[in-house]
Each structure stands twice: as C-alpha cells, then as structure tokens.
Amino acid sequence: MNSWFAKNLFRVLCAFICICIVAILLITVSWLPAFGDPDSPTNNEVSAKYLEDGVEDTGAVNIVAGMILDYRAFDTFGETCVLFVAVCAIVALMQDDRKPHAMDKPSYASERPRQDAILRTTSLVQIPMIMIFGFYVILNGHLSPGGGFSGGAILGSALILHANVYGVEHASRFLSFKVYRRTVSVCLIFYALAKGYSIYTGANHIRSVIPLGTPGKLLSAGLIMPLNIAVGLVVACTVYIIYILFSKGDEE
C-alpha cells in the first residue's frame, strides 16, 4: 500500500511540476514582443549595441565571438555543457551492467590498426596539418571567423582519422575516456569560474580588471581566447568520444 501511494504521489508531483513549468513558459511567451515588431529590442537596441560598442566592450574584432563569449557567454556555456551531458547519456545507455568497467577498457570494431601503407603514409602528413589548422581557428576566433566550436570540430576530425588509421587502442594512450572526463571537467569549471568572475567585475557598463589589449592583436579580447580554447577542447574531445562510443563493436 505504501509503495502504491509513493509511486502515485511521485507521478502527481511530476505532473504538477511539468504543468507549472509549461505555465511559466506560456506566460513568458505571452510577454514577448510580436514577431517583426519594429520596436522589439532584437530589431534595434541589442543588435545596435553589438555592432557599435562590440569592439570597445569586448576587444574582439570578430563581433560574433564577442557576442557569444562575452555578452552572451552563459548561453555558450550551456551549449558546451550539453555536449558533456550528451556523452554522459550515451555512456549510461551503452553501459553493460555485467561489466561495470566496460567503458574504461571497451572492445571496439575499429580497435585494430589498418595496415594500408598509403593510408598510414598520407595520414602522417594530413593529421598534423589538420590539427595545426584546428588550433589556428581556435586561437584566432576573436580576430576572424572561427572559434572554439569550429576549431574543436576540426581537431575532433583529426582525432577520428588517427583512431581509424592507428586503432582505438593506440589513440586511447593519450585520450582515454578517463582523460576525456578530466579534460572536459576542467574546461567547464574554468569557463564557469571565468564568466562568474566577469559577472562581478566585467558585466555590461562595468570596466573589467582584465585588460582587453589592442583589438586586432592575437593577445587581445581579454578572456575570449582562453574561453575559445576551453570550448575547443570540449568540442574536440566530445566529437572523438561520441564517434568511439558509436563505433563499438560486438566483439568481446
């Protein structure tokens, strides 16, 4: 009787919470300006602020980078956390209860290295070039189109190519699932602390204590380049780990 009551109470509470969330969202939507309203802040004040004061406020020549990593940095932080949560969900779904540590030492269909001489030779040239280009895109994200997401995807493709050519076991020597957890955790914690710090010292209309440098220079834009590096590492590792998880074979 008690278990039946507890189960139904749980369902009622879940339904009540869902109804409250839906009501809050509907009320919020009802307060939004009409679509295409010329007086909407999104059509005048916000975009004008980004374009007119972006370089002065953020130090980033790339206005998009200044927007997503300064004005709206917490949106980007949430998107980055989604990648980590996605990997955690995949691991939870693919975890074999009979083998608690299966994800730390998995068996993969692509575990054995390929013996194709042409593929192995060309990869020696391609992988370093892809990684150099990926780091270039990340480090110059505040100066030109690019940044952490696009550069991280490029680095992730280099890691996937390395795993395909030399095998997952060889690639796991420097990027195992344990290393992934630690790397992503450190990057996300750094991001949260960095932007939490900026809330108190560098919010809009409050001068940040972190120098913005000279716009157009590599070492400029304050925290934007370190944040791009953190986002790039998260994206690169996540792209690689998701590929590895889904390439798991049936071999035991």
Image: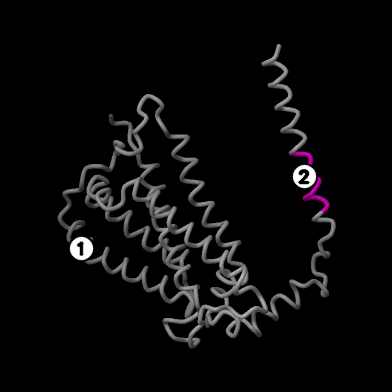
**In the image, is residue 20 part of the stretch drawn in magenta?**
yes
**Label 1 vs label 2, nearer the camera:** 2
Residue 126 left/right relative to 217: left
As rendered, which of 135 and 117 lies closer to the eye? 135
Is label 1 in a helix, a strand or a loop? Answer: helix
Q: Position of residue 229 (x, y in %)?
A: 42, 67
**In the image, is residue 111 part of the stretch drawn in magenta?**
no
Which amino acid type is marked by label 1? Leu
Which quadrant of the figure contains the N terminus?
top right
Sort mark 1 into few (<14), some (14-19) or many (20+) by Cα contacts within 10 Å.
few
Instruction: Say which mark, if any, is on residue 124.
Output: 1
In the figure, residue 249 lies in which quadrant?
Answer: top left
In the figure, residue 29 lies in which quadrant?
Answer: bottom right
Magenta residues (range): 18-27
Mark 1–mark 2 distance (CA, rounded to whole Å) = 54 Å
Residue located 38% across and 48% down the image: 241
Where 106 falls versus 196 (above or below)?
above
Where 104 falls versus 137 (above or below)?
above
Residue located 34% across and 33% down the image: 101
Residue 135 left/right relative to 75: left
Give the mark nearest the N terminus, 1 or 2: 2
Which amino acid type is marked by label 2? Val
Q: Main secondary structure of the magenta part?
A: helix
Q: Which residue is mark 2?
A: 22
Which quadrant of the figure contains the C terminus?
top left
Sort mark 2 into few (<14), some (14-19) or many (20+) by Cα contacts within 10 Å.
few
Q: Position of residue 60 (x, y in %)?
A: 53, 80
Q: Position of residue 118 (x, y in %)?
A: 17, 58
